[in-house]
Image (cartoon, rainbow, N blue to C red):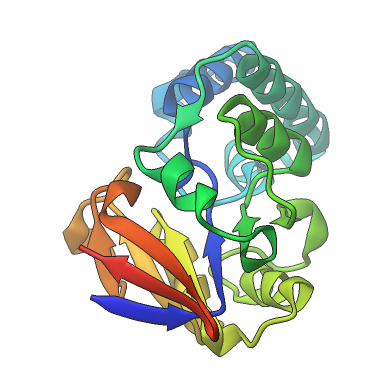
C-alpha cells in the first residue's frame, strides 16, 4: 500500500518507543503505595488514555491530583533509569523524515513523554501532549493541534497509533491511519493499514510531500 501525505503524526508509547517494562514498574510501585496491585489498575481501560483519567477511575476525587503528580515522578524516574527503547523500525523511519514533516502526539504528560523519547534517542521538533489540549483521544483535538503546528492540512496527515482511542481520534480528524499491533490484536484495530511494527513502513520525500509505503 502507498499513502501520500504531507506529515506523519505518531503516538509515543508502544508506537515509537517500547516503554511497557518501564510503565509496569512505575505503575506497580505507584499502585502499591495506594494499597492496590497492578491487576487492580488494569481492571479499568488503560491503553491510549491519560494517566489522570485512569487515576480518576481508581481513587476518590480528593486524592487524584496528588496521586497523578506522584505517578508522573515515578514514570520519569523509571524512564531516565533506562528500559525504554525504540520500537523496531522507528529510528530508521524517523531518520528519513525532515523535522517539520512529523510530530509526536501522546496522551502522556510532556515530562514523561520527553523522558521516554530521549531515552530512545528520539527528539521531535513538534510534540503535543496532554498538557497542550482540552480534549484527549479519542477526540480529534490532539491531532488537529499537531497539524496546525506543522502548518499542514489535516487531510494530508497520516496517524500512526497502537490504541483504538488514538485511531478513532485520527479518523475523527479526517486523517489516514496506520495501526501497529504492539498492544492490541489486528481484530481490535480499525485503520487504513495494520502492521506489526514500523519495520513495515518506509517513507520517501517527494516534491509534493511524502510517499509512505506500507508492506
Residue 98 vertical position relative to residue 17 in the rendered view, above or below: below
Residue 81 vertical position relative to residue 160 in the rendered view, above or below: above
Tell me if residue 153 can be seen.
yes
Point 40% across, 37% down: residue:
87
Point 55% across, 51% down: residue:
49
Measured as percent of width and height from the top left, residue 143 is found at 62, 71
Residue 88 lies left or right of residue 66; in this view the side is left
Residue 212 lies left or right of residue 95; in this view the side is left
Point 67% across, 17% down: residue:
80
Split into 4 quadrants, where in the image is the C terminus?
Answer: bottom left
Picture quadrant of residue 127 = bottom right
Measured as percent of width and height from the top left, residue 140 is found at 60, 76
Q: Which residue lies furthest to the front in this view?
A: 207
Picture quadrant of residue 42 = top left
Point 67% across, 39% down: residue:
113
Residue 178 vertical position relative to residue 162 in the rendered view, above or below: below
- The residue lying toward the viewer, choosing from 167 and 94, is 94
Measured as percent of width and height from the top left, residue 84 is found at 51, 24
Number of numbered labels in the structure image: 0
Measured as percent of width and height from the top left, residue 126 is found at 73, 57
Picture quadrant of residue 211 = bottom left
- The residue lying toward the viewer, choosing from 81 and 33, is 81
- The residue lying toward the viewer, choosing from 161 and 156, is 156
Tell me if residue 59 can be seen.
no
Split into 4 quadrants, where in the image is the N terminus?
Answer: bottom left
Residue 196 vertical position relative to residue 119 in the rendered view, above or below: below
Amino acid at each position: 500500500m502507498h499513502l501520500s501525505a504531507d506529515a506523519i503524526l505518531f503516538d509515543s508509547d508502544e508506537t515509537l518507543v517500547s516503554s511497557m517494562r518501564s510503565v509496569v514498574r512505575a505503575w506497580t510501585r505507584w499502585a502499591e503505595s495506594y494499597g492496590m496491585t497492578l491487576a487492580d489498575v488494569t481492571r479499568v481501560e488503560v491503553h491510549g488514555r491519560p494517566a489522570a483519567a485512569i487515576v480518576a477511575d481508581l481513587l476518590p476525587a480528593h486524592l487524584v491530583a496528588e496521586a497523578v503528580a506522584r505517578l508522573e515522578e515515578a514514570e520519569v524516574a523509571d524512564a531516565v533509569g533506562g528500559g525504554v527503547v525504540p520500537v523496531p523500525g522507528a529510528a530508521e523511519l524517523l531518520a528519513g523524515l525532515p523535522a517539520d514533516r512529523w510530530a509526536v502526539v501522546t496522551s502522556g504528560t510532556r515530562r514523561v513523554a520527553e523522558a521516554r523519547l530521549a531515552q530512545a534517542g528520539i527528539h521531535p521538533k513538534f510534540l503535543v501532549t496532554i498538557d497542550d489540549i482540552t480534549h484527549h483521544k479519542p477526540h480529534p483535538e490532539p491531532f488537529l493541534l499537531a497539524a496546525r503546528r506543522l502548518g499542514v492540512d489535516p487531510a494530508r496527515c497520516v496517524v500512526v497509533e497502537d490504541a483504538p482511542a488514538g485511531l478513532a481520534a485520527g479518523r475523527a480528524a479526517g486523517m489516514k491511519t496506520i495501526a501497529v499491533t504492539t498492544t492490541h490484536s489486528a481484530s481490535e484495530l480499525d485503520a487504513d493499514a495494520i502492521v506489526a511494527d514500523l519495520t513495515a513502513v518506509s517513507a520517501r520525500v517527494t516534491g509534493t510531500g511524502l510517499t509512505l509505503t506500507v508492506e
